[in-house]
């Protein structure tokens, strides 16, 4: 199976969690050893949003604020590459072409941000489209997708299954802005609606949930 694993910065980097990063590295190696082709896309979490805030305070335009977050996510991705060692291609993939080339070598692809105007959610959806992935698993800081933000609304209900056309009505934001923070960004939603790439959103604080999703077990929220 060709799998894209979206590792949320809100999971491994808000605050920085070396132990959890290590578990994700082991997970990616295990998926590769099981014969899966793997792409990991790592977010920048609260550190990226802090850089965006500082960039805004300095009067930088939105594209430049995005670039600060992209570089933070690439720093996280570099940590993953170093920890993966020979299981990686030795470098963070900065383009979709880099990702394709790395995947052809049989190694784990690791990416951060690509360009302004999108978060790493959209990067994961784009690379999934480019490599014709079978599955996208997002390791998030919540248990799946809810009817409302569960951190704000105690009566929010978890949705176990969704169709791609249901996504846009669930989220507050319908356009990208630097530092946007919702379960899937608007550009990712548009890409997923186009590609119909099967997606599972799981609680990423337990890396085993990603394995469960790859195995097809009932976990998180399935979008198909």
Image: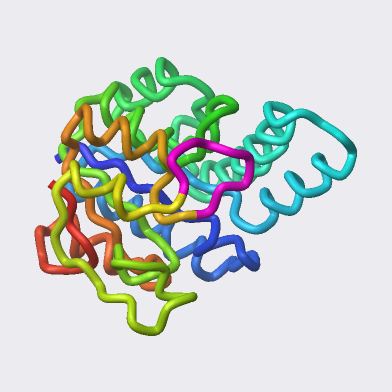
Q: Residue at x 64, y 68 (%)?
A: 15
Who is closer to the viewer here, 30 or 179? 179
Q: Position of residue 201 (x, y in %)?
A: 29, 58
Q: Position of residue 83 (x, y in %)?
A: 53, 50
Q: Residue at x 39, y 69 (%)?
A: 142
Task: Decide if residue 136 is on the left or right side of residue 84.
Answer: left
Task: Decide if residue 133 is on the left or right side of residue 156.
Answer: left
**Quarter holding residue 59:** top right
Q: Which residues are the magenta region?
A: 173-181
**Quarter holding residue 221:** bottom left
Q: Residue at x 23, y 61 (%)?
A: 211
Colouring scheme, one of rainbow, by chain, secondary structure, one colour = rainbow
Q: Would you say the magenta stretch is mainly helix, strand or loop? A: loop
Q: Quadrant of the N terminus?
A: top left
Tag count in the figure?
0
**Quarter holding residue 168:** top left
Q: Residue reaching furthest right?
A: 58
The question of residue 178 being in magenta is answered with yes
Residue 167, relative to residue 187: is it above or below? below
Task: Decide if residue 28 is on the left or right side of residue 51.
Answer: left
Residue 24, relative to residue 149: is it above or below? above
Q: Residue at x 41, y 20 (%)?
A: 96
Q: Position of residue 180 (x, y in %)?
A: 56, 47
- Whether residue 35 is visible: no
Who is closer to the viewer here, 160 or 173? 173
Residue 93, relative to residue 171: is it above or below? above
Q: Residue reaching furthest bottom?
A: 154
The question of residue 69 being in magenta is answered with no
Q: Position of residue 224 (x, y in %)?
A: 12, 46
Who is closer to the viewer here, 136 or 155? 155
- Whether residue 17 is visible: yes
């Amino acid at each position: 199976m060709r799998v894209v694993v979206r590792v949320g910065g809100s999971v491994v980097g808000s605050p920085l969690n070396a132990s959890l990063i290590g578990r994700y590295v082991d997970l990616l190696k295990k998926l590769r050893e099981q014969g899966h082709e793997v792409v990991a896309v790592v977010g920048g979490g609260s550190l990226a949003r802090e850089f965006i805030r500082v960039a805004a305070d300095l009067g930088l335009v939105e594209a430049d604020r995005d670039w600060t977050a992209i570089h933070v996510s690439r720093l996280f991705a570099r940590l993953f590459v170093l920890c993966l060692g020979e299981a990686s291609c030795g470098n963070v993939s900065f383009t979709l072409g880099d990702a394709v080339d790395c995947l052809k070598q049989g190694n784990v692809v690791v990416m951060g941000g690509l360009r302004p105007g999108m978060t790493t959610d959209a990067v994961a959806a784009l690379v999934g489209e480019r490599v014709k992935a079978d599955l996208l698993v997002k390791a998030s800081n919540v248990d799946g997708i809810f009817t409302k933000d569960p951190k704000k609304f105690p009566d929010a209900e978890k949705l176990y299954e969704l169709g791609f056309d249901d996504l846009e009505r669930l989220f507050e934001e319908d356009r990208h802005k630097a530092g946007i923070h919702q379960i899937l960004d608007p550009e990712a939603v548009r890409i997923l609606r186009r590609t119909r790439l099967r997606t599972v959103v799981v609680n990423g604080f337990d890396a085993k949930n990603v394995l469960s999703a790859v195995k097809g077990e009932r976990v998180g929220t399935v979008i198909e």
